[in-house]
Amino acid sequence: MKLVIVTSVGDFQKEILRLFKKANIENFSSSDIEGFKNNTSVLMESQWFSGEKLSNASDLFFSFTEDKHIDTLFDLIKAFNANLETNNPIRAIVVPVERFI
């Protein structure tokens, strides 16, 4: 068993749910998060009270699941990212789980 963590901009929420379903990952959790890019030029140019939003509505999904499902999910994410027209790919990582109850 491993922990897979997936992050994306909020616009891809439905797509990620579809990818999880296709990968047979039935049990997962999600959370709304704020995504930031540490772009120095943008941060330096913005005024303290400019009203500019430097973050993006993002989503975080995670699931404790089997390797075979994670392999399928990664293949699906790679295919999805290959056809993106934006610079906001879906990101995913896998963390090994040493023990669980």
Image (cartoon, rainbow, N blue to C red):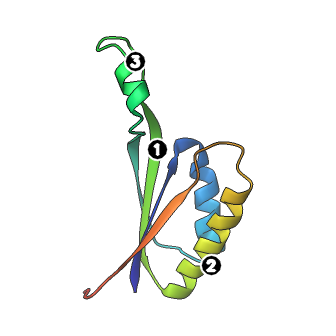
Specify the amino acid type for callout 1.
Answer: Ser
Specify the amino acid type for callout 3.
Answer: Glu
Q: Is residue 8 visible?
A: yes
Residue occupied by mark 2: 72
Query: Does the residue at mark 1 contact the one at mark 2 (Cβ under 8 Å)?
Result: no
Q: Is residue 23 visible?
A: no
Q: Give the label on residue 101, or none.
A: none
**Quarter of the image that includes the C terminus:** bottom left
Residue occupied by mark 1: 58
Identify which residue, 87 or 11, lies in the foreground: 87
Q: Residue at x 46, y 72 (%)?
A: 27
User: Residue 40: image x %, image y %?
Assistant: 38, 32
Q: Residue at x 42, y 27 (%)?
A: 41
| Disc 3 packing (10 Å; few <14; some 14–19; many ≥20) | few
Identify which residue, 46 or 58, lies in the foreground: 46
Specify the amino acid type for callout 2.
Answer: Thr
The CA distance from mark 1 to mark 2 is: 23 Å
Residue occupied by mark 3: 45
User: Residue 59: image x %, image y %?
Assistant: 46, 49
The answer to whether residue 80 is above or below residue 40 is: below
In-image side of 85 versus 42 (left or right): right
Please state which of the two labelled residues, at mark 2 or mark 3, is closer to the viewer: 3
Q: Callout 1: helix, strand or loop? A: strand
